[in-house]
Amino acid sequence: MFVSQCGQVVSVDGSDITLDFEPEFSDESNYAAFRTREGLTSLYVVVQGPSSNVITLLSPPTLNFTPVTDGSMDSTFVSFGSASEWGVRGIIRTISPQGDNLVELTAVEYMPEIYANDDGEPS
């Protein structure tokens, strides 16, 4: 996920995605990642859409899921940025104080497969 620009999907019209924020585009290629009920989808290459809070999907040109925008549950989350701003979802394992206003974090990459069988019966 991108670490600096994020918000929610307001509406979808073909390849145009209206956001609840105005993304700041960089000179690099720009990407959007969407969180679905199953986790993040693939990255989408995007360009500025017809207004300041609209992105247009270039590659792939359509979403591979239906975003939630009707208020029936939390709206679909989107993160936005350039390739150099991409971050990885993680689980914090330890936090160690290192001085005033400084800590060291130890984390592992979040992998949804680890939790896939949490509600299952032991075999």
Image (cartoon, rainbow, N blue to C red):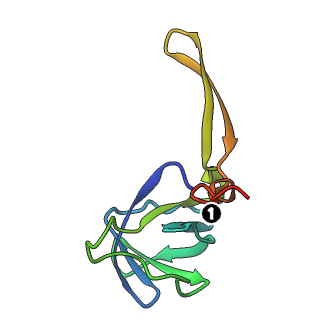
Query: Can you name the residue that lies furthest to the right here?
Result: 123
Q: How many numbered marks are there?
A: 1
Q: Image height check: is 48 above or below 22? A: below
Q: Nearer the viewer, residue 111 or 105?
A: 111
Q: What residue sits 40% from the left and 68% below the top?
A: 76
* Residue 121 on image: x %, y %: 64, 58
User: Which percent across, then down, holds residue 52?
Assistant: 34, 70
**Residue at label 1?**
28
Q: Percent from the top left, x then y, of residue 101?
A: 49, 15
Q: Classify 10 Å Cα crowding around label 1: few (below 14), some (14-19), many (20 and above).
A: few
| Left or right of 57 on screen, residue 115 | right
Q: Element type at marker 1?
A: loop
| Residue reaching furthest to the front | 123
- Residue 54 placed where, x, y %? 38, 75
Hey, which quadrant is residue 10 in on the image? Answer: bottom left
Residues 6 and 38: in front is: 38
